Image (spheres, grey):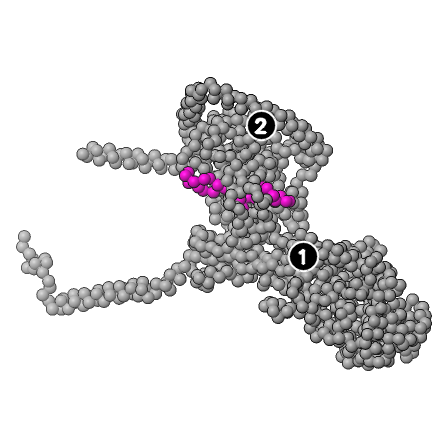
């Protein structure tokens, strides 16, 4: 009995000492520890994600040959259409470059594209974060925009060796500027996610809408990236306005809710747009920002 | 063991004195207990509310937030004063305390290790630490804003943002003031991110880019935040600046919204954000209507005076809008034409132009040159800009505040007075030579020309001086003055209608109250000696002591056009205005007499002194005037033209005045005519649209 009590006492003391040590540890060591834990966890997350892909593969293998032929035919048609569009796009790109050169217009930020599979999503942060199966080894850096086609999914917040965390457009920690379809001349609005529970639809709030803005009649207004902030390329679709635009209590501005353009519930693959040169924000967020800041100046 | 005192340890004292003492102590303690209990109960049950209020007063505070101002529209509903979003970068001083502390300790260490420092000034180091930390953050902010990620090809149209160091460092005095007076509020690092420094306002694209860079790139969740509010914007820049006015900073915020009264805030400490109050023009006189209702935030506060937790809040409410009677197209035309009248050094001549709706008295255009840009005054008035405008005389609204001799435009009054008082009739002819002798002095005809036989109509066409000397002298100063007063040339104008519950008494602030219609009593009053015939001759041609404003002369033209004596001008648009004018009666001329006046004014444009303002397809009635005034002790000319159009069915009346320079030849028709013509063309375009 006494031995048990002494053992319990020793455990409590050990716990207190451990907590005390943890609190007093320098933040660098704690950050390293967290990083190590993430790296330790990463293979398990990757394995889990790959096994899901494998299961999907075998599920597709079980389909009938007729189904696969039909799907293949459909894909071939889509492919042909896309190839045509690609040619047209190439012409437009060249024309765009020529005009920019003529007008001495600043080049828009250049990006490299990294395609990544979605590794896992936590139920408690369903509308806030997801993990993707690409990381530092693949050239991904914090702050990179994450898209699906021309639709914005979110932004990379933390990068580990082989996985990265993505803040979704529906997360309260996400923010960017946008233009609204039908606003002429376009004036910037502020977009930020709204806290939602996993069983509802994720949404974002569009604020600082000018009082004289009215969405185009008969259609749902798109929310489009401005390309001015140096993070998101111009013209990507963030989402569409939901339920109209309402006046703020002050009466001088409007606000609206936005549903993301890509169904974030079922998303399995994304593209990470890695800017060719680091943005000022990236430099600021790096631990040695002061040195780099001076260098940059 | 034997009890030495032979007493049981638990026995009560048998000594009666001891018992009394114990009883006394017992009663004392009971009474004390009752006193404390009763006291507590009294505080809990009776004084609870009062104590709660005292407690609230110590731990809570109210922050009053200013509302956005109402918009101002022109008569067609175009927005001429708007609000734009202002993005301010602010620092949360409370969150920065650990950084301040760290920097402070670092500075102390440095000071202690410095042998040249004999005595450490801890207060100064504390202030320096705060400045260092805030400047560090400011550096980061500008780093993000300035950075151009397109390194290989830097844009030729790169950032136009201010490189002035003052815009990029924290002002020591501003920080000290903030910490003393309003430390609970966030400290403003950059007032207007999109337009840093009002005098360096960047273009809208650059403004959008600046805000976007900050929002998308600056790390969030830290002590630095971006907040937006509404700030005044004048989309047409200098247009109608004297009418619209401008705003200035004020912590005297408008009353709060209704639910403020639900809570007992009277005794709570109140902090106010800086709001805006109208400082001139409509912004000032209609401030109670435009300024809206303040919002508030109820906070708990820390022992060191910072805001801790937001308990309740109420949003401010935007002010009401106002529809002015101005028409932006006519206004812009008037201002452009005024700017085009230049002196020999190619600088615009000072002047004013007014156009009224003849029937309603609504002012369609009111321009004054030189002017100012109210956008430059939104955030703060810089000394440089203030002095620049001051030196040009740009703060004066010459249309309502300038006092000028009306010159030959006054001859309309002399002619009316002459006919009403039977000194002359419409068809009487006077022989007019090159001059007219009054006393010992020859009063000349203008241009030294003899006009020969002149009747009323011809007099107005050619603007004969001699005709007016003769009629004026027959009338005498009192009848001339009486007639001028009948037309309200010295009456206060733009009085606020009593239906608008507004403490301001006039629609535009500070209209001049030094207008003069002279008479013998006036001359004696100012100590200039007795009235003489020469004064009457001068008065009859609008010279001498007579002083009025361009707005008064526009009203005179409108009154003649309507055959009434008074016009009540207004700057507020009311589509249901009935066209009745306060104190207006019929001029009192018969049909022929009135026709002579009108016909003379019409011929003035067709063949007389106002030929420069002819417009094809539009008949105009006008009267020019060139009066003399003294500028810096030397004679210069004032150029006038007043009139109305169309001559046969009057719709608009106008008055234009240009202050000539010493080295410039300035004449009524030649100089002021083109401005009136531009206004009429603007009005015609608007009329065609309708």
Q: From where the camera sits, is residue A231 visible?
A: no
Question: Which stretch appears magenta?
Answer: A178-207
Which quadrant of the figure has residue B10? bottom left
Tell which subunit mark 1 falls on.
B
Write the residue at 50% across / 48% down: B92
Q: Position of residue B192 (x, y in %)?
A: 60, 48
Judging by the rendered image, the residue that carries numbered circle 1 is B76
Gap between marks 2 and 1, in whole Å?
Answer: 52 Å
Q: Position of residue A245 (x, y in %)?
A: 54, 47
Write the residue at 60% across / 50% down: A212
Q: Position of residue B514 (x, y in %)?
A: 73, 71
User: Which residue is at the front of the view, B408 or A158?
Assistant: B408
User: Which residue is at the front of the view, B390 or B602?
Assistant: B602
Is B671 placed left or right of B100 in the picture? right
Judging by the rendered image, the residue that carries numbered circle 2 is A112
Is B462 placed left or right of B106 in the picture? right
Mark nearest the camera among 2 and 1 is: 1
Label 1: how many residues lie within 10 Å, few (<14), some (14-19) or many (20+)?
few
Considering every residue shown, the one lying at the far front of the view is A66
Secondary structure mostly seen in magenta is loop
User: Which residue is at the front of the view, B481 or B146?
Assistant: B481
Are the numbered discs 2 and 1 placed on the same chain, yes or no? no
- Whether A193 is among the magenta residues is yes
Relative to residue B644, is residue B209 depicted above or below? Answer: above
- Whether B78 is among the magenta residues is no
């Amino acid at each position: 009995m006494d031995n048990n009590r002494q053992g319990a006492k020793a455990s409590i003391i050990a716990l207190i000492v451990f907590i005390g040590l943890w609190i007093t540890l320098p933040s660098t060591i704690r950050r390293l520890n967290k990083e190590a834990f993430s790296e330790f966890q990463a293979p398990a997350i990757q394995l889990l994600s790959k096994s899901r892909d494998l299961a999907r593969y075998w599920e597709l293998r079980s389909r009938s040959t007729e189904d696969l032929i039909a799907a293949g035919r459909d894909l071939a048609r889509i492919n042909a259409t896309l190839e045509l569009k690609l040619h047209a796009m190439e012409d437009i790109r060249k024309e765009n470059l020529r005009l920019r050169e003529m007008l001495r217009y600043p080049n828009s930020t250049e990006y490299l594209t990294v395609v990544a599979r979605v590794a896992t999503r936590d139920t408690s942060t369903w509308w806030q974060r997801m993990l993707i199966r690409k990381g530092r080894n693949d050239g991904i850096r914090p702050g990179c925009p994450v898209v699906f086609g021309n639709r914005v999914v979110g932004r990379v917040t933390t990068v580990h060796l082989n996985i990265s965390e993505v803040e979704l457009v529906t997360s309260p920690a996400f923010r960017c500027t946008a233009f609204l379809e039908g606003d002429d001349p376009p004036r910037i609005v502020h977009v930020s996610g709204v806290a939602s529970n996993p069983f509802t639809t994720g949404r974002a709030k569009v604020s600082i809408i000018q009082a004289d803005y009215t969405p185009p009649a008969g259609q749902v207004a798109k929310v489009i990236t401005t390309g001015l902030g140096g993070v998101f390329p111009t013209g990507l679709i963030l989402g569409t306005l939901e339920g109209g635009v309402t006046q703020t209590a002050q009466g001088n501005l409007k606000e609206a809710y936005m549903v993301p353009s890509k169904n974030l519930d079922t998303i399995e693959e994304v593209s990470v747009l890695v800017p060719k040169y680091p943005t000022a924000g990236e430099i600021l967020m790096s631990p040695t920002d002061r040195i780099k800041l001076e260098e940059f100046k | 063991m034997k009890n030495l005192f032979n007493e049981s340890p638990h026995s009560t004292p048998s000594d009666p004195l001891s018992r009394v003492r114990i009883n006394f102590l017992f009663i004392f303690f009971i009474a004390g207990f009752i006193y404390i209990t009763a006291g507590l109960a009294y505080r809990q049950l009776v004084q609870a509310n009062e104590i709660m209020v005292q407690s609230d007063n110590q731990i809570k505070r109210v922050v009053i937030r200013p509302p956005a101002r109402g918009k101002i529209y022109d008569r067609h509903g175009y927005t001429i004063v708007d609000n734009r979003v202002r993005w301010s970068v602010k620092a949360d001083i409370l969150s920065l305390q650990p950084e301040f502390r760290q920097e402070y300790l670092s500075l102390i260490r440095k000071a202690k290790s410095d042998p040249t420092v004999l005595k450490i000034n801890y207060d100064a180091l504390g202030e320096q630490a705060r400045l260092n930390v805030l400047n560090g953050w400011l550096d980061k902010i500008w780093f993000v804003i300035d950075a151009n990620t397109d390194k290989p090809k830097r844009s030729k149209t790169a950032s136009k943002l201010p490189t002035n160091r003052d815009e990029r460092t924290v002002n020591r005095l501003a920080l000290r003031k903030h910490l003393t007076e309003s430390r609970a509020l966030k400290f403003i690092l950059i007032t207007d991110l999109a337009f840093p420094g009002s005098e360096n306002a960047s273009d809208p694209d650059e403004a959008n880019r600046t805000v976007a860079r900050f929002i998308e790139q600056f790390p969030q969740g830290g002590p630095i935040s971006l907040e937006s509010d509404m700030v005044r914007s004048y989309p047409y820049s200098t247009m109608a600046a004297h009418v619209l006015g401008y705003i200035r900073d004020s912590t005297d915020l408008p009353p709060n919204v209704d639910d403020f009264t639900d809570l007992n805030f009277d005794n709570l400490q109140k902090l106010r954000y800086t709001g805006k109050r109208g400082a001139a023009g409509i912004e000032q006189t209609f401030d109670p209507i435009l300024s809206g209702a303040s919002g508030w935030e109820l906070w708990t506060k820390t022992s060191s005076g910072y805001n801790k937790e937001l308990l309740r809040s109420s949003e401010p409410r935007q002010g009401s809008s106002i529809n002015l009677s101005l028409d932006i197209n006519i206004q812009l035309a008037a201002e452009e034409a005024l700017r085009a009248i230049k002196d020999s050094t190619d600088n615009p001549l000072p002047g004013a132009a007014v156009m009224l709706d003849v029937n309603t008295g609504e002012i369609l255009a009111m321009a004054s040159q030189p002017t100012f840009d109210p956008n430059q005054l939104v955030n703060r008035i810089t000394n440089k800009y203030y002095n620049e405008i001051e030196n040009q005389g740009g703060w004066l609204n010459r249309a309502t505040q300038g006092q000028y001799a009306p010159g030959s435009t006054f001859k309309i009054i002399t002619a009316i007075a002459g006919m009403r008082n039977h000194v002359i009739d419409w068809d009487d002819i006077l022989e007019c030579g090159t001059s007219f002798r009054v006393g010992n002095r020859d009063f000349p005809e203008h241009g030294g020309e003899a006009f020969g036989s002149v009747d009323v109509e011809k007099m107005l066409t050619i603007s004969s001086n001699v005709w007016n000397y003769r009629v004026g002298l027959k009338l005498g100063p009192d009848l001339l003055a009486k007639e001028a007063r009948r037309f309200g040339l010295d009456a206060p104008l733009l009085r606020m209608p009593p239906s608008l519950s507004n403490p301001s008494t006039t629609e535009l602030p500070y209209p001049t109250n030094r207008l003069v219609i002279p008479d013998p009593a006036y001359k004696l009053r100012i100590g200039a000696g007795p009235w003489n015939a020469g004064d009457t001759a001068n008065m009859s041609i609008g010279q001498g002591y007579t002083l009025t404003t361009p707005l008064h002369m526009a009203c005179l033209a409108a009154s003649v056009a309507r055959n009434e004596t008074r016009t009540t001008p207004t700057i507020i648009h009311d589509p249901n205005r009935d066209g009745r004018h306060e104190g207006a009666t019929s001029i009192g001329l018969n049909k022929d007499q009135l026709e002579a006046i009108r016909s003379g004014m019409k011929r003035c444009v067709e063949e007389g002194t106002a030929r420069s303002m002819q417009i094809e397809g539009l008949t105009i009635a006008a009267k020019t005037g060139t009066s003399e005034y003294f500028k810096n002790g030397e004679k210069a000319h004032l150029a006038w033209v007043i009139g109305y159009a169309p001559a046969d069915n009057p719709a608009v009346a106008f008055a234009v005045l240009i202050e000539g320079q010493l080295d410039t030849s300035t004449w009524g028709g030649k100089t002021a005519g083109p401005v009136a013509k531009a206004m009429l063309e603007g009005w015609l375009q608007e009329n065609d649209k309708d």
